[in-house]
Amino acid sequence: MLTPGELAAQLGVDVRDLKRLRDEGRGPAYITLTPRTIRYLSSEVADWLSDDTAD
């Protein structure tokens, strides 16, 4: 599982960009462990990237 900071670093974007994508329902699937703790599954990120590049 990746933190928003880890994923942002991998994608070369800002953490705020990931939050915006979450808010818009356009980013990779994520898990909310607590109201302030979000994690991304590597497999979900890979699927999202694959779908995003296919468009």
Image (cartoon, rainbow, N blue to C red):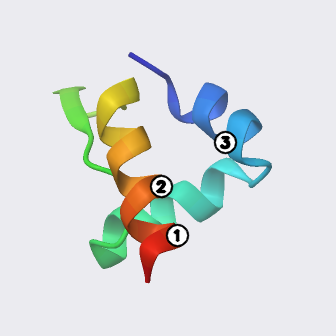
As measured in the structure, the alpha-carbon distance from the residue carrying label 1 to the one carrying label 2 is 6 Å
Residue 55 occupies which quadrant of the picture? bottom left
As measured in the structure, the alpha-carbon distance from the residue carrying label 2 to the one carrying label 3 is 13 Å
Q: Which residue is mark 3?
A: 8
**Is label 2 or label 3 in front?**
2
Element carrying mark 1: helix
Q: Amino acid at mark 2?
A: Leu
Residue 6 in the image, given as x and y percentages of width and height: 64, 26
Question: Which is nearer the N-term, disc 3 or disc 1?
Answer: 3
Q: Quadrant of the N terminus?
A: top left
Q: Is residue 22 above or below residue 10?
A: below
Q: Neighbour class for label 3 at 10 Å: few (<14), some, many (≥20)?
A: some
- In the rendered image, the residue lying farthest to the bottom is 55
Q: Which mark is residue 49?
A: 2
Q: Neighbour class for label 1 at 10 Å: few (<14), some, many (≥20)?
A: few
Q: Is residue 15 above or below residue 9?
A: below
**Is label 3 or label 1 in front?**
1
- The answer to whether the residue labelled 3 contacts the one labelled 1, judged by CB atoms less than 8 Å apart, is no
Q: Is residue 13 visible?
A: yes
Q: Neighbour class for label 2 at 10 Å: few (<14), some, many (≥20)?
A: some
Front-lying residue, 48 or 16: 48
- The answer to whether the residue labelled 1 contacts the one labelled 2, judged by CB atoms less than 8 Å apart, is yes
Q: Is residue 38 visible?
A: no
Q: Amino acid at mark 3?
A: Ala
Residue 5 in the image, given as x and y percentages of width and height: 64, 31
Residue at 41 percent across and 41 percent down: it is 45
